[in-house]
C-alpha cells in the first residue's frame, strides 16, 4: 500500500513544515492506538485455544508432568476456573499485560524467563543476517537496475527465485552436510565450542565461526526478497519524469542513480515489515538444524515435551514482537517519507 | 485494465473447450513461464500417476542406508525403505495438502472479501479488521500451536493451513469488488432487478477472477512451504510421508545418508519455484496494474 504512494507521487525529500510534522505525529499516534486491538486479538486467540482444545485446561497446561496437589490447586485458583468465562478472560488479559506469560511445568520456570534467556541468540542471528544480506540484496539490485535483461540481471533474478522458494531448513541441512560435515570449514552445531572456553576476542571469533553458516542460510531469503523489491522499485524510479529531467540537466550517471536510489529504496523498509513473520519462522527452523540456542530450539524442545504453556507463551510473545516490528516499520517509514499520512 | 477485464468476461462465458484454448493463448507464455508450467504439469502427473505402481510406502527392505544407484534410484533410508517411493508419495501428499489448503483459503477469502467489498460500511470495517489481525498473527506459530494441541491428522492440517491463508485472498477480492460494484454493467443488472447473489456470483466474480487466480497460485506455494515446515518439526501425519516429513527423518542421519535430505528438499524447491515463477508471469499477464511492482 505504502509502495503505491511512493510510486505515484513526487520524489521524497521535500521540506516539511510544522503542519507536516504534526501530520506525521498524528499518523504515528493513530498507528500506536491501532496496535492495541491487535494485541488484545492475539491474546484472545490464545485464550480461546486453551478452552477449545480437547481436554480440560489444567491437564493441557500441566502436560505429562506430575504436579503436586498444591500446584494444581494454585493453577486452578490462578486460572479462576470456578469463575465465569469472561472473568477468566479478563484475568488472563490483565496477567499478560503485566508480563506474565504463564509457568512451564516441564521446565519448572516462568515462561517469560525461559523466553528472555533465548532472545539474545535469536536476535544476534536474525540481525546479523538481516544487515549483511539486505545490503547485499539492495546493492545487487542497484547494480543491475541500469541494465535490465542483461546476463547479470537474469542471473540475479534466477537466484532470487531460488532464494524465495527454498525451504530454509533444507538449505540449512545441505549447508551443514557440505560445509560442516564434509569440508569441515565450520562447526556443526551450537553457538560456542564446547571443548575450549574462549575469552575476549577469541570468544567473539568463536561465536562468529558458529554464526556464519546459519546466518548465510537465513540470509538467502532476505537477499532474494530485497533483490526482488529493490530491483522493481529502482526500475520504477528510473522511469519517472524527474530522472529524465535529471538526465536532461546533464547530471552525471552516478548522481542520477543516487536520485533514483533515494526514492527507489524507501519501499524496502516496508518489505521487512511484510516479511518479518516468514523470516522469523525461517529463523526458528534454521536454529533447529544448527542447534543454535535461540527461541527456535526452545520451541522445538517445548513441542516434544508437550509443554503447552511454553508454546502458548511463545506464540503470544512472537505475535507481540511482530506487531511492534510492524509499528516501528510504519513509524520509520512515515519519518522518511513526508507524504505518508496525507490521506 | 477495463478492456482487459471485459475481455476475460467474454472468454468466461464461452464453452469449456474454447475457454481452455483461449486461456492458454491468453497466457502468452515466454521461456521461464513455459518451463515453470511444464515442470508443474510433470510434477502433478508424477505425484498422482506414479505412486500406485510403487507398492507399500512403508515396506522395509533388507538394505538400509543404500546410496542412490540403479537398484534404488534415490537410495534407501534408515529402515531400508525406498526413498524414491517415499518421494513419489511425498509429492502426492505435499501437492494435495498445498492445493486443498489453498482452495480452503480461497473459498473463505473470496466469500468474506466479496461480502466486505459489496456491502461496504460496518460489515466491511469489521471483516477487514479481523483479516488484519490474522495477517499479523504469525501463521507458522499459530499453525504449530493448533496442530500440537488438536492432533496431526491430514484433514486437520489442511484445514488449519487453509484457515490461516484467507486474509490475503479476502483483501484482493474486496479490492476488486469495491471497484467493480460501481461499473455500469453491475448497475444495469441491479436496475434490472437481479438478486444480490446473482450480481455477486455471475456479474462481479467472473470479472474479479484474474487477480484471484494469481492469489491462488501464491497460496498453493506458501501452503506447501508451511506444510513442509510443520512436518519437518514432526507435526505431520506420520502414516503418510510428505516431503517435509522425509526431511524430518533425514535430520538425524545427515552424516550417513545425505540422499535422504537432498531429494525431498529438491522436490519442494522445484515445485515452489515453478509456482512462484508461473504466478509472477500470471501477474504480468492478468494484472497489468501490478506490473513493475515487486509482487
Image (tube, rainbow, N blue to C red):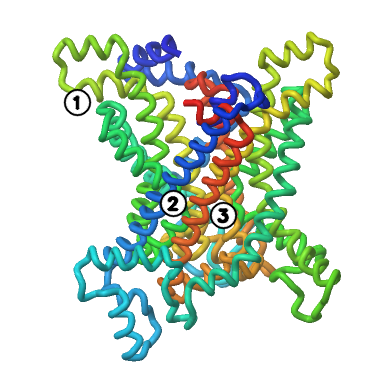
**CA distance for labels 3 and 2:** 12 Å
Q: Secondary structure at mark 3?
A: helix
Q: Chain of mark 2?
A: B
Q: Chain of mark 3?
A: A
Q: Nearer the viewer, mark 1 or mark 2?
A: 2
- Camera sees residue B34: no
On the image, the x and y values in percent for residue B175 come to 38, 27
- In the drawing, what numbered circle is on residue A280? 3
**CA distance for labels 1 and 3:** 41 Å
On the image, the x and y values in percent for residue B122 come to 26, 34
Q: Chain of mark 1?
A: B
Q: Mark 1 or 2 closer to N-term?
A: 2
- Camera sees residue B251: yes
For image coordinates 71% across by 70% down, the residue present is A191
Q: Is residue B233 left or right of residue B64?
A: left
Q: Nearer the viewer, residue A22 or B225?
A: A22
- In the drawing, what numbered circle is on residue A129? none
Q: Are marks 3 and 2 on the same chain?
A: no
Q: Is residue A104 left or right of residue A47?
A: right
| Number of on-image labels | 3
Q: On the image, which quarter does residue A172 sit in?
A: bottom right
Q: Which residue is mark 2?
A: B137
Dot 2: few (<14), some (14–19), or many (≥20) neighbours within 10 Å?
many
**CA distance for labels 1 and 2:** 32 Å
* Residue extending furthest toward the front: A18
For image coordinates 46% across by 30% down, the residue present is B214
Q: On the image, which quarter does residue B72 sit in?
A: bottom right
The answer to whether the residue labelled 1 contacts the one labelled 2, judged by CB atoms less than 8 Å apart, is: no
Q: Which residue is mark 1?
A: B197
Dot 3: few (<14), some (14–19), or many (≥20) neighbours within 10 Å?
many
Q: Nearer the viewer, residue A5 or B251?
A: A5
Q: Secondary structure at mark 1?
A: helix
Amino acid at each position: 500500500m505504502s509502495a503505491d504512494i511512493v510510486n505515484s507521487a513526487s520524489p521524497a525529500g521535500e521540506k516539511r513544515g510544522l503542519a507536516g510534522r504534526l501530520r506525521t505525529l498524528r499518523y504515528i499516534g493513530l498507528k500506536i492506538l491501532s496496535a492495541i486491538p491487535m494485541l488484545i486479538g492475539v491474546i484472545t486467540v490464545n485464550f480461546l485455544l486453551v478452552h477449545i482444545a480437547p481436554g480440560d485446561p489444567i491437564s493441557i497446561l500441566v502436560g505429562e508432568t506430575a504436579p503436586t496437589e498444591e500446584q494444581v490447586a494454585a493453577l486452578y485458583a490462578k486460572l479462576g476456573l470456578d469463575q465465569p468465562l469472561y472473568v477468566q478472560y479478563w484475568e488472563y488479559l490483565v496477567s499478560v499485560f503485566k508480563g506474565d506469560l504463564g509457568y512451564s511445568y516441564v521446565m519448572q520456570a516462568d515462561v517469560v524467563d525461559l523466553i528472555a534467556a533465548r532472545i539474545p541468540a535469536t536476535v544476534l542471528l536474525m540481525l546479523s543476517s538481516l544487515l549483511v544480506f539486505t545490503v547485499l540484496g539492495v546493492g545487487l539490485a542497484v547494480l543491475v537496475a541500469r541494465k535490465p535483461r542483461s546476463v547479470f540481471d537474469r542471473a540475479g533474478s534466477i537466484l532470487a527465485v531460488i532464494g524465495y522458494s527454498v525451504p530454509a531448513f533444507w538449505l540449512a541441512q545441505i549447508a551443514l552436510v557440505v560445509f560442516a560435515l564434509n569440508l569441515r570449514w565450520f562447526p556443526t552445531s551450537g553457538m560456542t565450542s564446547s571443548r575450549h572456553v574462549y575469552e575476549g576476542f577469541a570468544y567473539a571469533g568463536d561465536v562468529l565461526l558458529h554464526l556464519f553458516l546459519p546466518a548465510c542460510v537465513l540470509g538467502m531469503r532476505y537477499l532474494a526478497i530485497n533483490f526482488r523489491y529493490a530491483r522493481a522499485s529502482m526500475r520504477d524510479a528510473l522511469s519517472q519524469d524527474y530522472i529524465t529531467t535529471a538526465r536532461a540537466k546533464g547530471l552525471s550517471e552516478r548522481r542520477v542513480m543516487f536520485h533514483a536510489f533515494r526514492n527507489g529504496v524507501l519501499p524496502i523498509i516496508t518489505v521487512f515489515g511484510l516479511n518479518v513473520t516468514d523470516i522469523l519462522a525461517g529463523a526458528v527452523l534454521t536454529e533447529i538444524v544448527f542447534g543454535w540456542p535461540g527461541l527456535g530450539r526452545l520451541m522445538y524442545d517445548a513441542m516434544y515435551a508437550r509443554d503447552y504453556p511454553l508454546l502458548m507463551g511463545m506464540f503470544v510473545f512472537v505475535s507481540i514482537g511482530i506487531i511492534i516490528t510492524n509499528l516501528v516499520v510504519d513509524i520509520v517509514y512515515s519519518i522518511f517519507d513526508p507524504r505518508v499520512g496525507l490521506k | 485494465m477495463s478492456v482487459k477485464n471485459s475481455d476475460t468476461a467474454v472468454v468466461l462465458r464461452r464453452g469449456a473447450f474454447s475457454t481452455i484454448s483461449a486461456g492458454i493463448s491468453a497466457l502468452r507464455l515466454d521461456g521461464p513461464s513455459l518451463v515453470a508450467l511444464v515442470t508443474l504439469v510433470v510434477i502433478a502427473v508424477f505425484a498422482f500417476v506414479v505412486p500406485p505402481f510403487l507398492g507399500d510406502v512403508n515396506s522395509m527392505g533388507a538394505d538400509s542406508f543404500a546410496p542412490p544407484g540403479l537398484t534404488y534410484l534415490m537410495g534407501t533410508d534408515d529402515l531400508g525403505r525406498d526413498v524414491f517411493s517415499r518421494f513419489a508419495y511425498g509429492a502426492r501428499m505435499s501437492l494435495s495438502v498445498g492445493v486443498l489448503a489453498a482452495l480452503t483459503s480461497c473459498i473463505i477469502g473470496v466469500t468474506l472479501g466479496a461480502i466486505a467489498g459489496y456491502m461496504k460500511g460496518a460489515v466491511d470495517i469489521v471483516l477487514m479488521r479481523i483479516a488484519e489481525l490474522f495477517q499479523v498473527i504469525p501463521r507458522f506459530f499459530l499453525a504449530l500451536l493448533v496442530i500440537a494441541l488438536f492432533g496431526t491428522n491430514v484433514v486437520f492440517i489442511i484445514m488449519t493451513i487453509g484457515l490461516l491463508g484467507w486474509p490475503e485472498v479476502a483483501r484482493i477480492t474486496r479490492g476488486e469488488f469495491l471497484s467493480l460494484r460501481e461499473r455500469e454493467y453491475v448497475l444495469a443488472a441491479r436496475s434490472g432487478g437481479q438478486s444480490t447473489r446473482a450480481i455477486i456470483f455471475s456479474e462481479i466474480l467472473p470479472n474479479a477472477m484474474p487477480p484471484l487466480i494469481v492469489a491462488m497460485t501464491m497460496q498453493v506455494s506458501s501452503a506447501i512451504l508451511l506444510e513442509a515446515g510443520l512436518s519437518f518439526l514432526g507435526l505431520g501425519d506420520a502414516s503418510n510421508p510428505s516431503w517435509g516429513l522425509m526431511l524430518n527423518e533425514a535430520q538425524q542421519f545427515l552424516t550417513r545418508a545425505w540422499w535422504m535430505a537432498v531429494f525431498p528438499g529438491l522436490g519442494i524447491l522445484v515445485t515452489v519455484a515453478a509456482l512462484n515463477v508461473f504466478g509472477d508471469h500470471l501477474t504480468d499477464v492478468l494484472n497489468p496494474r501490478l506490473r513493475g511492482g515487486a509482487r
